[in-house]
Image (cartoon, rainbow, N blue to C red):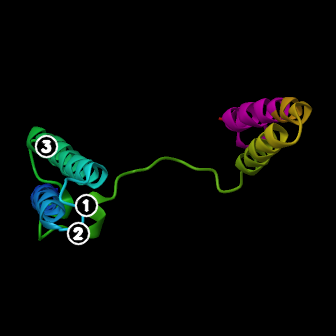
């Protein structure tokens, strides 16, 4: 993460230099002879954005109290691989829930009555997915 923070500070400096060069270029140009405000603000705000992100990531890195596995040269790939969670490989509920969400957005585009039906199907699918392990062969 320290390398990312340093890269973002370098990008901040880059955008500051580019903003100054953009203003000078606009003032030197014989056809324009004035500051072009849209580009100046866009480049300046890009520099401010990168400085905010670099500052935030720097604070997070210092508050961690140690290095991340990807910052160490002797780390293995498995060191930075946390347990993500448990997912049911045989469950059909997520597919049905996605289909009801697609039907919901179709109803917003075509007719509201389709959305009402999709909301009912979506609630049924969500409840079925949540309580999948409380009934049937996989009950605990």
Measured from the top left, where is residue 45 in percent x and y? 24, 46
Q: Report the magenta residues as a range.
A: 119-138
Q: Are marks 1 and 3 in contact (CB under 8 Å)?
A: no
Q: Which residue does the numbered mark 1 point to in the structure image?
A: 79
Query: Main SS of the magenta segment?
Result: helix
Determine whether the residue tagged by mark 3 lies in a helix, strand or loop. helix
Between circles 1 and 3, the one closer to the viewer is 3
Closer to the chain start, of discs 1 and 3, is: 3
Q: Quadrant of residue 103?
A: top right
- Tell me the element at label 2: loop
Tag 2–tag 1 contact (CB < 8 Å):
yes
Along the line of sight, the residue nearer the viewer: 52 or 100: 52
Graded by Cα atoms within 10 Å as few (under 14), some (14 to 19) or many (20 or more), the crowding at tag 1 reads few
**Whole-Å distance between the Cαs marked 3 and 2?**
28 Å
Mark 2 burial class by Cα count in 10 Å: few <14, some 14-19, many 20+: few
Picture coordinates of residue 129, whole percent (x, y)? 70, 38
Decide: is 93 above or below 32: above
In the rendering, at what x and y percent does residue 33 appear? Answer: 18, 59
Residue 89: x %, y % from top left: 65, 56
Position of the C terminus, as image quadrant, is: top right
Q: Is residue 1 shown in magenta? A: no
Q: Where does label 3 land, which residue? A: 55
Q: Would residue 32 be found to the left or right of residue 140 on screen?
A: left
Q: Is residue 49 above or below residue 124?
A: below
Q: Residue at x 70, y 32 (%)?
A: 131
Q: Quadrant of the N terminus?
A: bottom left
Nearer-the-camera pick, 67 or 76: 67
On residue 76, which mark appears?
2
């Amino acid at each position: 993460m320290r390398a990312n923070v340093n890269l973002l500070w370098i990008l901040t400096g880059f955008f500051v230099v580019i903003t100054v060069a953009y203003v000078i270029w606009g003032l030197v140009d014989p056809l324009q002879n004035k500051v072009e405000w849209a580009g100046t603000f866009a480049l300046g705000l890009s520099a401010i954005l990168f400085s905010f992100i670099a500052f935030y990531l720097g604070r997070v890195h210092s508050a961690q109290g140690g290095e991340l596995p990807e910052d160490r040269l002797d780390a293995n790939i498995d060191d930075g691989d946390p347990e993500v969670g448990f997912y049911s490989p045989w469950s059909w509920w997520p597919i049905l829930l996605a289909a009801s969400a697609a039907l919901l957005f179709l109803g917003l585009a075509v007719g509201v009555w389709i959305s009402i039906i999709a909301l009912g199907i979506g609630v049924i699918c969500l409840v079925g997915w949540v309580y999948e392990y409380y009934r049937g062969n996989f009950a605990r």
